[in-house]
Image (cartoon, rainbow, N blue to C red):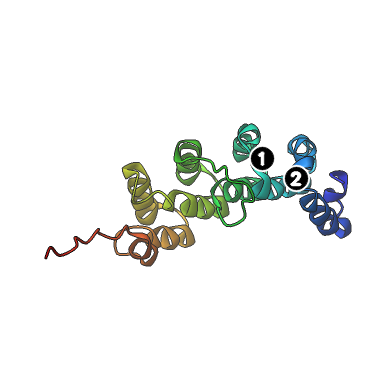
């Protein structure tokens, strides 16, 4: 099945089949992350988006250095997206934030930097370094799309305002 992820007309069916088998396919998916075909590596990252475990975290973090930008984007998404996760384990800020900061500052692909904005933006209210890096990207990134997206996550931006922690209101005393 992993090999079929690299065949365009078979990839989606293979992906759905593997996903349907759940955590049983995890060893094969982890092995697929080292496949010579970038499409296979990308699909394996997408599978880990649903099936990530503490054991697979190191493999997924390694994909952030993959030579293919699509693989790096899929790995970033897999690390950060809570909507897709099936289990109860989630990577922590300490796992995700340092490599996402690095990619936002240094990756040569604008699409990877744009995805890194979303990941770093998850921590803008809880980690000062996330806010600082987003402000730098908003002001200085060479790509206008990345600058615009970073602006959504800094003070004054729509996502920043929407995700800001709500102040705790005190109950009136009688």
- Taking the spot 47% from the left edge, 39% from the top edge, the residue there is 102
**Of 65 and 29, which appears nearest the observer?**
29
- Taking the spot 83% from the left edge, 50% from the top edge, the residue there is 5
Residue 7: percent from the left, percent from the top? 87, 52
Residue 121: percent from the left, percent from the top? 42, 53
Q: Quadrant of the C terminus?
A: bottom left
Question: Does residue 127 lie above or below 168 as drawn?
Answer: above
Mark 1, secondary structure of its residue: loop
Count the labels in the image: 2
Which residue bears the numbered disc 1?
A: 67
Residue 144: percent from the left, percent from the top? 45, 61
**Of 166 and 162, which appears nearest the observer?**
166
Task: Calculate the distance from the C-alpha at mark 1 to the C-alpha at mark 2.
Answer: 9 Å
Q: Residues within 10 Å of mark 2 (few under 14, many from 20)?
A: many
Question: Does residue 148 lie above or below 120 as drawn?
Answer: below
Residue 115: percent from the left, percent from the top? 53, 53
Which residue bears the numbered disc 2?
A: 38
Q: Residues within 10 Å of mark 1 (few under 14, many from 20)?
A: few
**In the shown orientation, is residue 95 left or right of residue 147?**
right
**Of 53 and 14, which appears nearest the observer?**
53
**In the shown orientation, is residue 149 left or right of residue 25?**
left
The reply to whether callout 1 and callout 2 are in contact (CB within 8 Å) is: yes
Question: Does residue 111 lie above or below 59 as drawn?
Answer: below
In front: label 1 or label 2:
2
């Amino acid at each position: 099945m992993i090999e079929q992820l690299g065949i365009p007309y078979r990839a989606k069916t293979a992906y759905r089949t593997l996903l349907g088998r759940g955590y049983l396919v995890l060893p094969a998916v982890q092995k697929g992350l080292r496949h010579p075909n970038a499409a296979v590596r990308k699909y394996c990252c997408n599978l880990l988006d649903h099936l990530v475990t503490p054991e697979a975290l190191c493999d997924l973090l390694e994909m952030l250095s993959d030579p293919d930008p699509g693989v790096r984007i899929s790995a970033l998404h897999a690390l950060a997206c809570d909507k897709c996760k099936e289990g109860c384990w989630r990577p922590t800020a300490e796992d995700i934030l340092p490599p996402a900061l690095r990619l936002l500052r240094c990756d040569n692909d604008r699409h990877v930097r744009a995805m890194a904005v979303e990941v770093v933006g998850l921590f803008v209210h809880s980690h000062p370094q996330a806010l600082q890096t987003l402000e730098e990207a908003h002001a200085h990134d060479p790509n206008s799309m990345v600058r615009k997206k970073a602006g959504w996550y800094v003070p004054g931006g729509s996502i920043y305002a929407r995700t800001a922690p709500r102040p705790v209101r005190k109950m009136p005393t009688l």
